[in-house]
Amino acid sequence: MTSTVTPPTNVDQKFRAAMSAFPSGVTMMTTAGPDGEPRGFAASSFCSVSLDPPLVLVCLAKTAQCHDAFIDNDQWSIQVAGAVHVDLVTRFATKGVDKFAGGEFVPDHRGVPVLVDAAVLIECEAHQRYDGGDHTILVAKVLDIDVDDRPALLYFQREFRHLDHFPMQGAF
């Protein structure tokens, strides 16, 4: 009996390709650093967790420059990016740049920077933090939400997209 040894596949590349086939919204999560300066990052890894209590989660790379700020500060804000925010989201996803340049951010009543023209603004606070491999899973309790009529930005197949608002016939 002969056995065939199959060479290992590059799971990392396949994983990235598989995740890029899943369309998602784009968020920017913000907080204030210990010096009071705004900190933030872009994330497509955002989802609802619970309705009672209202919980959402976002995954933050442990290598992100703002990682410690989200560990040290329990007051956060999540902005769902609008279709007009491609440049801003790109900046939020880039290391070593002023992430808050080019967007109109103001501090909320807690001192957390919020984007005034976000499609959705979620005021939240830390509920739990979990180890998630090379990421920290941030679970947040929702305190308040402001929903605008602006079309949201999507990320699909490694490109930004937007919906044309044409629902599929017969869907649900």
Image (cartoon, helix red, strand yellow):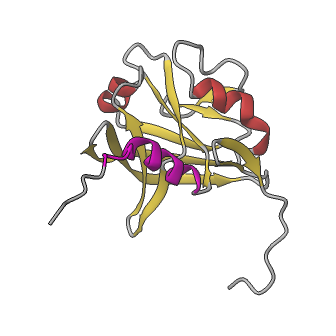
Q: Going 62% across and 21% down the picture, which residue do you hit?
A: 100
Q: Where is residue 58 in the image (x, y as percent from the top left)?
A: 43, 46
In this rendering, the answer to whether 89 lies above or below 7 is above
Q: Going 73% across and 28% down the picture, which residue do you hit?
A: 87
- Position of 45 with respect to 138 (left or right) is right
Q: Position of residue 48 (x, y in %)?
A: 47, 61
Residue pushed farthest left? Answer: 1
In the picture, the quarter occupied by the C terminus is: bottom right
- Position of 20 with respect to 70 (left or right) is right
In this rendering, the answer to whether 137 lies above or below 99 is below
Q: Going 39% across and 43% down the picture, which residue do you hit?
A: 10
Q: Where is residue 117 in the image (x, y as percent from the top left)?
A: 74, 39
**In this view of the protein, can residue 72 be seen by the observer?**
yes
- Where on the picture, by quarter, is residue 21? bottom right
First to last magenta residue range: 7-21
**In this view of the protein, can residue 126 be seen by the observer?**
no
Q: Does the magenta stretch include residue 71?
A: no
Residue nearer the viewer, 89 or 160: 160
Residue nearer the viewer, 7 or 159: 7
Q: Going 72% across and 83% down the picture, which residue do you hit?
A: 171
Q: Position of residue 126 (x, y in %)?
A: 34, 44
In the picture, the quarter occupied by the N terminus is: bottom left
In this rendering, the answer to whether 20 lies above or below 63 is below
Which secondary structure dominates the residues rendered in magenta?
Answer: helix
Residue nearer the viewer, 62 or 16: 16
In this rendering, the answer to whether 168 lies above or below 161 is below
- Where on the picture, by quarter, is residue 69? top left
Q: Is residue 16 magenta?
A: yes
Residue pushed farthest front? Answer: 1
